[in-house]
Image: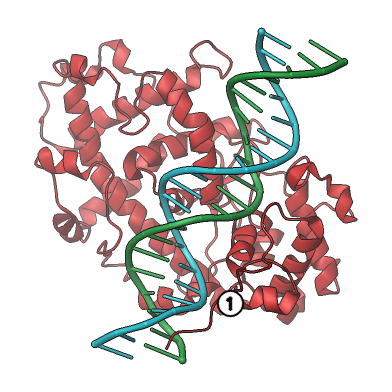
Chain colours: A red, B green, C cyan
Amino acid sequence: MGRPPCCDKEGVKKGPWTPEEDIILVSYIQEHGPGNWRAVPANTGLQRCGKSCRLRWTNYLRPDIKRGKFSLQEEQTIIQLHALLGNRWSAIATHLPKRTDNEIKNYWNTHLKKRLAKMGIDPVTHKPKNDALLSSDGQSKNAANLSHMAQWESARLEAEARLVRESKLRSHSFQQYPLANPAANYASSSSASSSAAQLLNKAWNNRGSGPSGVPTSAAGINRGDLESPTSTLTFSENAPTINSIPAMIEFVGSSGSNSETGIIKEEGGDQVVQDWKGFGSSMNLNHEYKEGVDHNSLSFSSGFHPHEMSTMEAAGAWTPESLRTSTNNEQVDNVMAEDGFTNLLLNNSDDRSLSDGGGGDSDNGGSAGSDDHYYEDNKNYWNSILNLVNSSPSDSPMF
DNA sequence: AAGTTATGCAACCGCAGCCAA
DNA sequence: ATTGGCTGCGGTTGCATAACT
């Protein structure tokens, strides 16, 4: 037989969480770690379903969450990953590790989707709405090229997501939860409740007020300085090493002018990150290890659903099966590593756009079928979108 | 100033896959 | 082998606030 029901539907509270509930939940998770959500309401006295507790933790209370305005880099990442992956918010979120899939989804639905629509770009297909009119001037070719590149990038994203997950798991193997590892615990905290309060303070500090407009001070929490002012966007460009906690390559984001320059910094020593590496994805430890990835032989057997697979197949492009084979080829890795799609997000210096008359249209001399050529065309395509987005202030009539 | 509409976002709902009993 | 809970995920809803008339 199965397990007992996770929670009694009767008497389960719904709606916004109160600061008191947050404190209870954070304190409990600090002590026991996330997971086993069914036990949380029973052990804490919270009148909440375990599922609700999990959601509250995952989307709001988790300490490694960055809240607030999305940086330009993040917007670009979301737009382009959405073009590649569609509404696979969790997959997109793996490339913005400090953002939750829920937050990214909300931001897409409330901001980016509308913005693209006003630009005349179909937010679903990421193609111009008047695509038919452009079919004879190279746009369809660009679309096909995009699909071609999308295959590579989708494959790479899957691999990176796996590597990120695996790296987290490996780091978990060497770290324990704060209470079990006082040396790594918060320097100013000596009890679960106080550190929970700090964590909660951080979570609530990241917004102007608490849920339902409840001011942060309502929780009676001291305002600390745990909130990191650094806006970061993490990419897993480097495969993690097995016996070390992987350093996180991050782009310094919206907190300063660095967001424009895409400066990369090492974040391996970040206190908050360090402290909370023990949390995160520990729930599926066994499952994740069973799914372990051979770094030298990446597999995309699960979850490989490129957003525009039909287009790819129609264009005579590769199948997932061929991709599996292809990804064993060093050449593939080199192409993506040296000039990966993600890097395009940061290389806005290339100002060529479709409206320029298209450098790609003077390409007859090149080998039309080569990857390099495809790649350049795609680069132009995306740069044109990015330039359009970047050059249009949010308050312009365009938006 | 008051009422109405639009916007943003936290939270809920329901489904699918996985896995323990 | 079967059942059913747990978890992750994407879609949707409802409320608070902002913007507008």
Quadrant (top left/top right/bottom left/bottom right) for the N terminus of chain A: bottom left
The answer to which of A82 and A224 lies nearer the viewer is A82
Q: Secondary structure at mark 1?
A: loop
Q: Position of residue C6 (x, y in %)?
A: 51, 75
In the image: residue A300, left or right of residue C15: left
Q: What amino acid does circle 1 point to?
A: Asn
Whether residue A137 is visible, yes or no, is yes
A299 lies above or below A181: above
In the foreground, A2 or A241: A2
Q: Position of residue A160 (x, y in %)?
A: 39, 57
x and y percent of residue A54 in the render?
60, 64
Using the image as rendered, state which of residue A236 and residue A46 is in the foreground: A46
Instruction: Tell whether A120 sits left or right of A305.
Output: right
The structure residue drawn at horizontal position 45% and vertical position 39%, both measured from the top left corner, is A77
Label 1 CA crowd tier, 10 Å (few <14, some 14–19, many 20+): few
Residue at the disc numbered 1: A36
Q: Dot 1 falls on which chain?
A: A
Residue A339 visible within the image:
no
| Percent position of residue A104, x then y | 52, 43
Residue A39 horizontal side relative to residue A104, left or right: right
Instruction: Pick the residue in front: A38 or A228.
Output: A38
Residue visible at 30% across and 59% down in the picture: A303
Q: How many marks?
A: 1
Q: Is residue A362 above or below residue A238?
A: above
Q: Image quadrant of residue A133?
A: top left
Residue A386 placement, left or right of C21: left
